Image (cartoon, coloured by chain):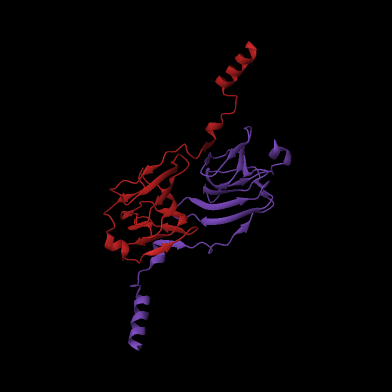
Chain colours: A purple, B red
Amino acid sequence: MKQLIATAISLAVLGTVPALAESMVITPNGSRPSAKGASAQFTGSVILNSLYAPNDSMSSSGGHVTFEPGARSAWHTHPAGQVLIVTSGTGWVQEEGGRKREVRPGDVIWTSPGVKHWHGATATNSMSHIAITNMVDGKNVDWLEHVTDAQYRN
Amino acid sequence: MKQLIATAISLAVLGTVPALAESMVITPNGSRPSAKGASAQFTGSVILNSLYAPNDSMSSSGGHVTFEPGARSAWHTHPAGQVLIVTSGTGWVQEEGGRKREVRPGDVIWTSPGVKHWHGATATNSMSHIAITNMVDGKNVDWLEHVTDAQYRN
């Protein structure tokens, strides 16, 4: 028995037990705490679920965002662009000078670098999307003013 | 009326009507046809749904993949790494020399560049995941041999 334990410890110390965590990393659902969207950057109740962070090989971060009915981001730009993948509900997106457009599950939205825009739920329904946001110089968003009620309902 | 039409045409030609398609692009669900996973690269029935392609600002491609029970990718590597976000069902992932591990909705899997691995459904349940795959020199995957039934059930 002692020998078995010693062997197990040796294997662990020597690293001959496959070091799975170093090449294929699973972060289980529930291991990444949810956060609330800050009131400086969002209107209404918004839940942010981080999915993954950038690393040496991955220049984007990923998150899953849920907006309650009426909730939306402030106006903002992304210095290196962003992909949104709508996963549930019904939402609105709008770029400056453009019309408000409805988005639904399975729709994919590409926002080019520097385009001023917002996204959120409709007035009556919640909306969730995955956001894949590119980083440049450690930054992935520049926040601007809130979307007013008049702008949102327009 | 003629003048109104002429004005509208001029505005369109001059590009003073906001060119929405150029800065915030929505690709609606249903506009990207599904494809079947090729038998050279997959075992069993696999459905590939493209989400987005790389562009000047986005170095990854995105897709949603569904594996029927028993279906799985061949062994493969990614030259610039890959993130999987499990969206439904129950699946298995395995890297060479490692154990087979179960994944469920909300789990996120990061596979480092060059790591030989496979992913798929369990023997009894389907599994779907989003795949965010980095490109390097226009390439995002190197396909290897199939996962044998013995390897799959091990």
Q: Residue at x 51, y 52 (%)?
A: A61
Which x, y percent locates residue A91?
61, 43
Q: Residue furthest front?
A: B124
Residue A30 rendering spot, x and y as whole percentages:
54, 63
Residue at the location (60% across, 51% down)? Answer: A66
**Horizontal arrangement in the rendering, residue A58 relative to residue A46 (left or right):** left
Tell how many labels: 0
Q: Position of residue B10 (x, y in %)?
A: 58, 17
Q: Quadrant of the N terminus of chain A?
A: bottom left
Answer above or below: position of A101 versus A72: above
Name the foreground residue: A81 vs B2.
B2
Say left or right for A74 vs A24: right
- Whether residue B129 can be seen here: yes
Q: Quick one: A86 or B15, which is closer to the camera? A: A86
In the displayed structure, B139 sits above or below B100; it is above
Residue B96 shows up from this direction: no
